[in-house]
Image: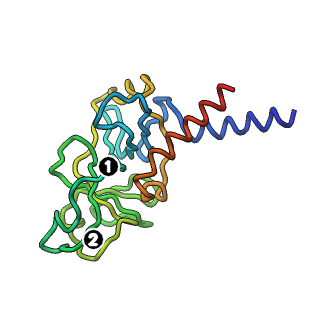
Amino acid sequence: MIRAVFLLFASVLACAAQSQRTVDLAPGKFLVAARNLPDPNFGETVVLLVKHDDKGAMGLVLTRESRYTVGRLFPDFAKGNDSPIYLGGPVSRTGVIALGHTKQAPKGAETVLSGVWMSADASLVERLVREGATPETFRLYLGYSGWAAGQLEGEVRQKVWHIFPADAVAVFSDPTALWKKLVRRTELEIARLSN
């Protein structure tokens, strides 16, 4: 009896940790690409969902480095800064979006989840780069990922995305390991439930 209650409790916790239900789509969630995701723009990626409403969704791919560094993009005031810049998605790759990790979002920034904000404000980005912001608390993305109304929900129903709650620590963790860690967690849960 105790074992059955424990397994039920563990199952409830695991379901809260990851989902493939469209009702769980919201800003501040991770979209983790399933291994069978057919779009090469999103293969083996983790996307931080930053906006989601009845008009569509917007996110930033956290796990794809571009060929640019901060110093290369801003040679006038950040020469020598070799922090990577990431590809936020296939849409509008000429625009720069910043993600930051501070207790309170600076003026001109929009809170995405507790301790994480985003901004496309050029003056804020320049100020933080000049002040020496590091990848542990500040990252830049070229472009973003976008979905029209209902499009992301359709992809979730096709089971090509797993939805996880995001947190600041995970958002600013090692981007090269994030997808493998989260997709493995999903696969272990699926295997456990099938047994």
Amino acid at dot 1:
Arg
**Residue name at image x 83 percent, y 36 percent:** 3
Relative vertical location of residue 44 with respect to residue 131 in this rendering, above or below: above
**Residue name at image x 56 percent, y 41 percent:** 185
**Residue name at image x 86 percent, y 37 percent:** 2
Relative vertical location of residue 102 with respect to residue 38 in this rendering, above or below: below
Residue 152 appears at what percent x and percent y?
36, 30
Amino acid at dot 2:
Leu
Looking at the image, residue 18 sits to the left or right of residue 155; the answer is: right
Residue 75 appears at what percent x and percent y?
14, 70
Quadrant of image for the C terminus: top right
**Residue name at image x 40 percent, y 66 percent:** 136
Which residue occupies the foreground of this view, 15 or 188?
A: 188
Residue 128 appears at what percent x and percent y?
27, 71
Q: Which of marks 1 and 2 is in front?
A: 1
Q: Could you say which quadrant of the image residue 109 lies in?
A: bottom left
Relative vertical location of residue 129 with respect to residue 95 in this rendering, above or below: below
Q: Label 1 crowding class (10 Å Cα cut-off): few <14, some 14-19, many 20+? A: many
- The label shown at residue 64 is 1
Looking at the image, residue 119 sits to the left or right of residue 177; the answer is: left
Quadrant of image for the N terminus: top right
Q: Name the residue under label 2.
A: 128
Residue 138 appears at what percent x and percent y?
34, 64
State how far apart marks 1 and 2 are (Cα): 22 Å
Residue farthest toward the right in the current orientation of the protein: 1
